[in-house]
Image: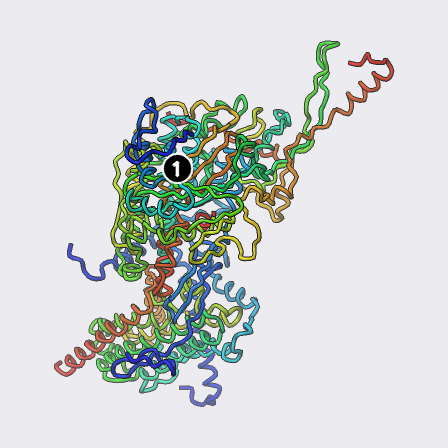
């Protein structure tokens, strides 16, 4: 009400009961070693009491220089590296890059390989969202959902390991399809790396298991009034902010942006034959982002169930020269990575090594919106909204 | 890359040769190029590139956002075209390669699948460009990263400090002239290290000495 | 009974017995929390410590903490930093002076027992505030201030709930309350169900346990006011929390579940069975707290205050009105 | 069903109490061991008779973690007066598992079936320098290489 600056009084309530003095705001460093920053992210926050007045994310602690590394590696070696950018969804990172190289070389991957890629991408999406379903309640203080989600995630990772050999870093994609044989020699050449026996039955039981896990999570977390109290109306990313900052993936769909690249990019993976719908919520807050991801787990389960019945027979990989020389050209391919739009802009000058690869990751833009969203939040709300963005520092820093 | 000459305003498709099947992508690219007043455009491999001069950079972005509804700011980065390369393979035909920085900014529509990459070229000596932050607030981080990696100065950027690297880091890592430290230090284990046969060689040498050039 | 023993010796004997019993029960509760919490999360919990079922895990923890370096940060305010844990533990131990363990087995049957109980239990708040302020780091400062606000906000519903029990029992002394429950052979939890819920929620807040563990918020404040503590002092705080659970469990058992009394037992049988019954009731209450801790998230500071002022206090007042009118009418 | 205001809290309690009385899922590792999938990439096994030290794997390895040294050996041809053929004999074949990222490029690129994947994972060391497995250790892993699994029909 009255502004008495000379004695530092900012505001006096009507009855003169409470007088607010101007205290200087405290700079609070959240990170880089902090339990809830999903890795090494440092948030320099100006804090007045517990309310944040200004937030500056300070990234780069995890910068491995991917784009410089790609300039000294052949395409097969890059393939082995890029599933480490977003280490929670390893397989999904490879698909966009391998499609970009295939487009440059004009090679069509075989249908069987494309469908296996689709199944493994959806399994990776389920494992990524389950990890989110375990770390997000942990940010809010509930420790038990972490154990349930991790326990059920093991079933999906076992499936990935039985097919590709690696749980997190499969390195299973090859230009023209998937890894055809265990090795290059006489005997290893005809050891085919097709789907192992009993794979379909294992997928069926894993999907039922994941469905039950979703119901359990709904009862324990989604329906829980305290979680709703903590996350409804927290960390509002408006529709315009989501587009202007380039927020993509479940975070954008949580703010009402109805784009799902699986429906838009028709030649990436054979999604057109399968029916699934795009989950959007227009609550724009942490809770709706959580609902979008739990909904997407259910959609992915639906996709995988349809996909395993329509895997066409045929070779695992198309005819590709042994020494890979990619003709000169530029291409940008983007894919619906569980964290957002992940794209590769490959500039090749007709050699074994690309001239330049620009890697567009979802979490990089998802974090940049934080400095606008965090103004006025309390510290627990900041932690809740950071958790709801489901970012990983490898994705942010590349 | 087929470089189409700049079209006149009224019929953007005039430049496309009759034989080439006019895909929807080419129509969109030609139309966008006309609206933006681009020098040229290409649409191969399914990626639309629209080449714009440096001073039309900001209003090209504005028209792309408003008229072509490309409101989603995907990413902004650069390519360093230079003759000698400290790392990796050099460009295709090196001798007539024009040394330049190419700044690329990809914009896509938040609802449809239309998208385009605006490209402009900067000379190596004065790498300056207007910042897109007034047009897209999301561009701030991308431009900071591009500035610290290539040394391009974005005029009008609110706080153009280093994004990833520590503030006191000198040099611009993504330039082709920046060597990759890890590969300098460790010797390459790949060179063939198979010595000759000690036994046979001496036998042959001994044989040659005694019987002249009779050796095996 | 044994009057000829000099008072001082009697006093130290009583203090030693209470201290030992409290710490043993606290250690058992720590083991309970580890095991029950683990099984709730579909995992096994401690297994190898001490042969079978990891029974010696709390002892192993205690020894581990003791041999850790006991450092005092330079920015800390030394004496206050060193004293904080002992003030907190004193608060929880002092509660056992008035808790009746058997018909005649009570340290000192104060006739203002309930009043003393509440006064002493707010002493541990002081310990937490001292720890938070004196640690000299921002996170513990926030943790300490949060603890202060939270514990003061939840002192009121605690008191009002006890007032209702006192009206029901007609006396302030705890053994009187237990006898009142024994007389009507109906534990107060039945007529005082609202009071019981209010008291339980408020006691969770008093002990800084989830869903009210804001001062110790791991994912925000990296350990809240305990960030700078290590070694013996951390053990003191750690034990203080579980000793608090034991004392709060004892209070709830005495006020609402009938203390050492159990239906159908004659008074002299109670002389021996009393402590066991009280222990069982403490474990039941402790299980409830552990169960709640492993299910719920933390709530935010302002929501915490809103629950206290907008829900618990009106509820407690309403409960007092109901009890009073029923007392007069019946 | 009518939504009782705090029903979510009690449903949460019901879920946790159910799990309390179910069997925990943890596997007591040293006594009970879960067998990894036959294709799991645990460790690389070397078959020295197939290896002709063509250095392809060393060149293709992104992390530069394979080191090979070999020398030529004469093989006396069986027919008298026949040409003396030479063959590369391995002196040193080290894989530094401290650097290896298990990408599998070396096994895939080897043209002579010298490298095999084995799902063996229990080779932890106390010193990181012990992670440099030399030739005979890699040959030891050869026994742990499983038969390739049957395929989905």
**Which residue position is annotated with label 1?**
B39
Could you tell whether C294 is left or right of B205 in the image? Answer: left
Give percent across and percent down for residue A77.
52, 35
Query: Toward the viewer: C161 or A246?
Result: A246
The quarter of the rendered structure image containing the C terminus of chain C is bottom left
Label 1 packing within 10 angstroms: few (<14), some (14-19), many (20+): some
Q: Chain of mark 1?
A: B
Residue name at image x 38 percent, y 59 percent: A371
Q: Is residue D1 above or below residue C2?
A: above
Give percent across and percent down for residue A179.
46, 30
Q: Is any part of residue A126 visible from this angle?
A: no
Give percent across and percent down for residue A276.
26, 38
Q: Is residue B197 above or below residue B6?
A: above
The quarter of the rendered structure image containing the N terminus of chain C is bottom left
Residue name at image x 32 percent, y 81 percent: A19
Figure label count: 1
Give percent across and percent down for residue A100.
42, 34
Query: Toward the viewer: D151 or D26?
Result: D151
Query: Toward the viewer: D86 or B142?
Result: B142
Q: Is any part of residue A322 visible from this angle?
A: yes
Could you tell whether C109 is left or right of A33 in the image? Answer: left
Q: Where on the picture, by quarter, is residue C282? A: bottom left
Q: Is residue C287 above or below residue C164?
A: above
Q: Secondary structure at mark 1?
A: loop
The residue lying furthest to the left in this view is C329
Residue name at image x 44 percent, y 70 percent: A26
Residue name at image x 53 percent, y 30 percent: B93
The residue lying furthest to the top in this view is D80
Query: Toward the viewer: C114 or A13?
Result: A13
Q: Where on the picture, by quarter, is residue B68? A: top left
Model colouring: rainbow
């Amino acid at each position: 009400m009255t502004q008495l600056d000379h004695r530092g009084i900012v505001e006096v309530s009507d009855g003169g009961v409470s007088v607010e003095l101007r205290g200087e705001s405290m700079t609070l460093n959240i990170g880089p070693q902090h339990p809830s920053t999903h890795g090494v992210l440092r948030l320099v926050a100006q804090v007045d009491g517990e309310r944040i007045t200004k937030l500056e994310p300070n990234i780069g602690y995890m910068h491995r220089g991917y784009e410089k590394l790609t300039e000294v590696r052949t395409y097969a070696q890059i393939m082995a590296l890029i599933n480490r950018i977003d280490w929670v969804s390893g397989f999904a990172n490879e698909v966009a890059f391998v499609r970009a190289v295939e487009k440059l070389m004009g090679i069509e991957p075989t249908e069987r390989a494309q469908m296996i890629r689709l199944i493994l991408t959806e399994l990776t999406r389920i494992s990524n969202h389950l990890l989110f379903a375990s770390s997000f309640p942990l940010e809010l203080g509930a420790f038990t959902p972490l154990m349930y989600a991790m326990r059920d995630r093991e079933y999906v990772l076992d499936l990935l390991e039985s097919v590709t050999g690696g749980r997190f870093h499969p390195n299973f994609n090859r230009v023209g399809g998937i890894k055809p044989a265990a090795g290059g020699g006489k005997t290893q050449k005809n050891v085919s790396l097709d789907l192992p026996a009993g794979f379909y039955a294992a997928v069926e039981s894993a999907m039922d298991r994941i469905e039950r896990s979703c119901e359990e999570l709904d009862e324990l977390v989604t329906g829980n009034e305290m979680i709703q109290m903590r996350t409804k109306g927290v960390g509002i990313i408006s529709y315009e902010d989501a587009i202007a900052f380039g927020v993509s993936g479940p975070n954008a769909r949580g703010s009402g942006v109805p784009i799902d690249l699986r429906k838009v990019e028709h030649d990436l993976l054979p999604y057109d034959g399968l029916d699934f719908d795009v989950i959007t919520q227009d609550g724009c807050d942490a809770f709706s982002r959580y609902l979008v991801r739990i909904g997407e787990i259910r959609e992915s389960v639906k996709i995988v169930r349809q996909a395993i019945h329509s895997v066409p027979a045929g070779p695992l990989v198309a005819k590709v020269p042994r020494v890979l020389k990619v003709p000169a050209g530029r291409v940008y391919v983007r894919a619906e990575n569980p964290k957002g739009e992940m794209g590769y802009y490959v500039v090749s000058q007709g050699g074994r090594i690309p001239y330049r690869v620009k890697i567009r990751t979802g979490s990089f833009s998802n974090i940049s919106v934080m400095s606008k969203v965090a103004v006025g939040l309390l510290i627990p709300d900041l932690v809740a909204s950071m958790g709801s963005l489901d970012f990983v520092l490898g994705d942010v820093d590349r | 890359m087929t470089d189409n000459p700049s079209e006149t305003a009224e019929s953007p498709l005039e430049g496309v040769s009759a034989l080439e099947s006019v895909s929807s992508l080419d129509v969109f690219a030609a139309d966008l190029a006309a609206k933006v007043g681009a020098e040229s455009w290409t649409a191969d491999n399914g990626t639309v590139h629209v080449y714009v001069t440096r001073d039309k950079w900001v209003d090209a972005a504005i028209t792309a956002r408003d008229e072509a509804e490309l409101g989603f700011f995907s990413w902004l980065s650069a390519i360093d075209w230079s003759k000698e390369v400290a790392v990796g393979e050099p460009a295709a035909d090196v001798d007539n390669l024009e040394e330049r920085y190419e700044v690329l900014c990809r914009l896509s529509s938040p609802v449809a699948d239309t998208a385009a990459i605006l490209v402009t070229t900067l000379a190596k000596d004065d790498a300056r460009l207007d910042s897109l932050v007034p047009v897209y607030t999301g561009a701030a981080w991308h431009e900071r990263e591009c500035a610290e990696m290539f040394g391009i100065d974005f005029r009008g950027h609110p706080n153009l400090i280093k994004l990833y690297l520590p503030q006191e880091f000198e040099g611009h890592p993504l330039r082709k002239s920046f060597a990759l430290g890890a590969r300098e230090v460790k010797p390459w284990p790949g060179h063939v290290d198979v010595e000759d046969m000690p036994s046979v060689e001496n036998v042959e040498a001994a044989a040659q000495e005694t019987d002249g050039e009779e050796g095996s | 009974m044994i009057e000829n023993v000099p008072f001082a010796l009697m006093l130290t004997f009583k203090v030693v017995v209470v201290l030992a019993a409290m710490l043993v029960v606290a250690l058992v509760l720590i083991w309970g929390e580890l095991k029950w919490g683990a099984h709730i999360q579909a995992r096994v919990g401690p297994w190898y410590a001490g042969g079978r079922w990891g029974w010696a895990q709390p002892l192993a923890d205690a020894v581990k903490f003791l041999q850790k370096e006991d450092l005092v940060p330079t920015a800390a305010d030394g004496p206050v930093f060193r004293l904080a844990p002992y003030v907190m533990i004193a608060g929880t131990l002092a509660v056992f002076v008035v808790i009746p363990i058997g018909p005649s087995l009570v340290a000192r049957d104060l006739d203002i027992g309930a009043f003393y109980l509440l006064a002493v239990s707010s002493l541990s708040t002081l310990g937490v505030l001292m720890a938070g302020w004196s640690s000299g780091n921002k996170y513990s400062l926030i943790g300490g201030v949060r603890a202060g606000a939270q514990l003061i906000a939840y002192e009121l519903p605690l008191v009002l709930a006890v007032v209702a029990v006192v009206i029901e029992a007609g006396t302030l002394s705890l053994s009187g309350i237990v006898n009142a429950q024994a007389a009507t052979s109906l534990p107060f939890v039945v007529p005082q169900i609202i009071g019981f819920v209010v008291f339980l929620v408020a006691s969770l807040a008093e002990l800084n346990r989830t869903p009210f563990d804001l001062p110790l918020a791991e994912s925000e404040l990296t350990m809240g006011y305990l960030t700078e503590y290590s070694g013996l002092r951390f053990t003191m705080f750690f034990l203080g929390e579980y000793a608090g659970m034991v004392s709060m469990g004892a209070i709830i058992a005495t006020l609402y579940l009938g203390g050492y009394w159990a239906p159908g037992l004659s008074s002299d049988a109670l002389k021996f069975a009393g402590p066991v019954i009280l222990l069982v009731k403490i474990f039941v209450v402790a299980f409830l707290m552990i169960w709640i801790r492993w299910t719920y998230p933390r709530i935010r500071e302002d929501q915490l205050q809103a629950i206290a002022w907008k829900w618990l206090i009106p509820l407690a007042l309403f409960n007092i009105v109901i009890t009073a009118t029923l007392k007069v009418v019946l | 069903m009518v939504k009782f205001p705090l029903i979510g809290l009690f449903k949460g309690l019901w879920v946790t109490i159910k799990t309390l009385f179910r069997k925990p899922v943890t596997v007591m590792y040293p006594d009970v061991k879960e067998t990894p999938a036959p294709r799991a990439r645990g460790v690389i096994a070397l078959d020295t008779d197939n290896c002709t030290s063509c250095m392809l794997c060393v060149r293709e390895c992104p992390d530069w973690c394979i080191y090979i040294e070999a020398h030529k050996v004469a093989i006396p041809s069986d027919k008298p007066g026949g040409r003396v053929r030479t063959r590369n004999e391995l002196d040193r074949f080290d894989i530094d598992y401290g650097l290896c990222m298990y990408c599998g490029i070396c096994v895939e690129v080897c043209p002579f079936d010298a490298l095999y994947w084995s799902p063996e994972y229990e080779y932890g060391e106390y010193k990181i320098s012990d992670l440099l497995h030399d030739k005979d250790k890699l040959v030891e892993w050869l026994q742990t290489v499983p038969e390739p699994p049957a395929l989905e029909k």
